[in-house]
Amino acid sequence: MIAKGLTIAAVFVVAVTEVNAGFVGFGSGGWYGMNLNGTTGDIGSSDYVVIDIYAQFNDQGTDGFPYTSSTVLSLFNSNIWMSDGRHFNHAETTGGSWHPGFSLDLPSTGSHPGVDSFVLIGGSPGGSNNTELDSNFNPSTGGQVSTGGGWYTGSPAALQGRVDGDLRTWVGRFAILNNDAIGESITFSSMVSYNYGLGTGTWFGTNSSITASVTGVAIPEPSGFWLIGLGWTGLATIRNRFFGEPVYPRSLVVRG
């Protein structure tokens, strides 16, 4: 397994007020090096450094619902930035969209999912991903994420946001040119809505944040202890347009 460099610059902890919390925060395996030819490498010598962010759930569920059915519906009120204000890299067919549907493995067009920045509700980047940007997310911001923006599953019944075997759902990839990233950090903050399937209601996780710095020090990729942000679960069960069971996420297969 390729080693990934990660320094936890800060951990924001919110008290857990409910034992069966469900959503517990955001996490990542850390920054890693990626080249335009699709190969991974050392952070200090690769073309780009990349981090994948996940929404993490626990193994208790909420109100008796099975935890393996935890399904992310949306992220909203997001605030995502690099410490030095650098722009995130885009490498997809439109040249600057945050939508995962345009992140195709088409090198001849300059589209490289491995070094592209996008947001998503589970699944993999590509034309079949049903993630949509909400009205607060202005895709014309290019290398920056609109403050307060969000994204959601456009087809809740497709189950795209359901957790994987590690009880996590992929929610974003962020790539930075290597020379722009070393010594800097990303902060990812957002609120989450989720359910446990059709007709179960909708729950909300409070605003949860992680901050991860880019370093040249490689550490073994953690097998389980990668969660670096904690949150607690709202008790509301509001029935709204997100009802349904939003496809088990698949890991992105990087072109080798």
Image (cartoon, rainbow, N blue to C red):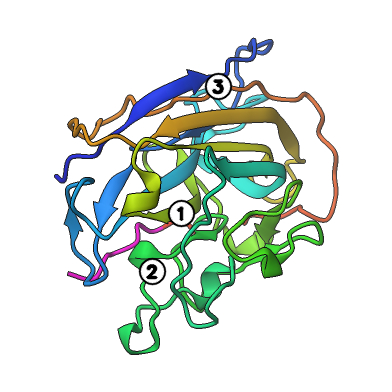
Badge 3: residue crowd in 10 Å (few <14, some 14–19, many ≥20): many
Q: Are marks 1 and 3 in contact (CB under 8 Å)?
A: no
Q: Dot 2 corresponds to which residue?
A: 113
> Which residue type carries mark 3?
Leu
**Secondary structure character of the magenta stretch overall:** loop
Q: Is mark 2 in CB contact (under 8 Å) with mark 1? A: yes
Compare residues 68 and 123 and report the one nearer the observer.
123
Amino acid found under the numbered disc labelled 2: Pro
Q: Quadrant of residue 195?
A: top right
Residue holding disc 1: 173
**Marks 2 and 1, the one that precedes in the sequence:** 2
Residue 159: percent from left, percent from top: 57, 57
Residue at the (58%, 15%) spot, across then down? 13
105 to the left or right of 217? right
Which sits earlier in the primary sequence, circle 1 or circle 3? 1
**What is the span of residues highlighted in magenta in the rendered image?**
250-256
Give the foreground label among 1 and 3. Answer: 1
Q: Residue at x 65, y 62 (%)?
A: 157
Give the labeled residue for mark 3.
230
